[in-house]
Image: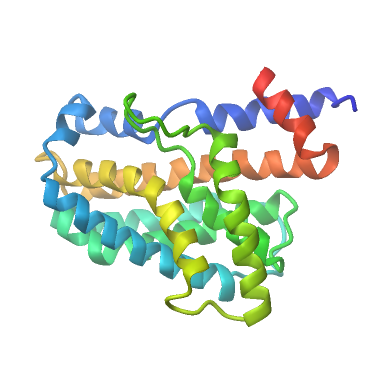
Amino acid sequence: MNIFQSDIDDLRYAKYLIENQTFADRIMKVIGVPFEIAFNKLPVSYHAKIHKITHKALKLGLDAAVSTIEEDITGDSSDSFHKWCIAATGFAGGALGFFSLTVELPLSTVIMLRSIADIARSEGENLSNIETRLSCLEVFAFGSKSNAKDEVDTSYYAVRAALAKIISEASEFIIERGVTQKGVPIILRLISQIASRFDILVSQKAVAMTTPVVGAITGATINTIFMNHFQNMARGHFIIRRLERHYGKDEIQLAYESI
């Protein structure tokens, strides 16, 4: 099937949003030091705490995705409004540094999820569909760049392939049971797989929040950059899903990889 040039342009834009610049690159411009140096100074004990906080945030995000996302809003997505909301949480968190993550990250994650869902809706997604809602949560797994030594492929389609089966199984479970239940293996596995990638970005955010230059104002800036990162991931992801609905996934993947 031939892809219209306008859709190729959309696909090129989606790939640019997903692959152009990492969250770490953007943050480095704010804190003004090589990010690897700052990242290596994060105490080992903090990584375990971040892992725990990230899981809590994603559990809240999953609950929000299943039960509280509005379905009947129309029009363009409200990207700026959601950035203002998350900047406010960063303003408070910037003054407290790392320890604000326990409260601030779960709240920020829910705000970001609502923005992601808003973008999905604006790209033609049906938010009454549980699989679509879990695809909103899936966005938190995109855009993390692990170290060169890491053998895990973090490219866009590789991450989608890694999560496809578990998202399908979790969707079936939620539809059958009607609610997400604590301790259910399939739900825990879904959260764990997304968290393994989201952890990287949260750790980078924690590094930025603990540098001496960061205060309340810069904390708001960092949170805005964090939101902008996931809005870019969401916009790219749901543009691609829109094109896949029209042309088929294989056709669009081939085109994406050839750009």
Spot occupied by residue 55 in the image (x, y as percentages of width and height): 35, 62
Q: 184 or 48, which lies in front? A: 184
Does residue 3 sit above or below 179 in this rendering? Answer: above
Q: Residue at x 28, y 56 (%)?
A: 51
Residue extending furthest toward the right: 1
Q: Residue at x 26, y 67 (%)?
A: 103
In this rendering, position of residue 213 left or right of residue 148: left
In this rendering, position of residue 206 left or right of residue 75: left
Spot occupied by residue 221 in the image (x, y as percentages of width and height): 30, 44
Quadrant position of residue 156: top right
Residue 77 in sight in this render: no
Protein image colouring: rainbow
Spot occupied by residue 58 in the image (x, y as percentages of width and height): 42, 62
Q: 165 or 242, which lies in front? A: 165
Does residue 61 sit above or below 253 in this rendering? Answer: below
Which of the image's four quarters has the N terminus? top right
Quadrant position of residue 67: bottom right
Does residue 212 sit above or below 64 in this rendering? Answer: above
In this rendering, position of residue 37 left or right of residue 21: left
Spot occupied by residue 147 in the image (x, y as percentages of width and height): 32, 29
Residue 60 in sight in this render: yes
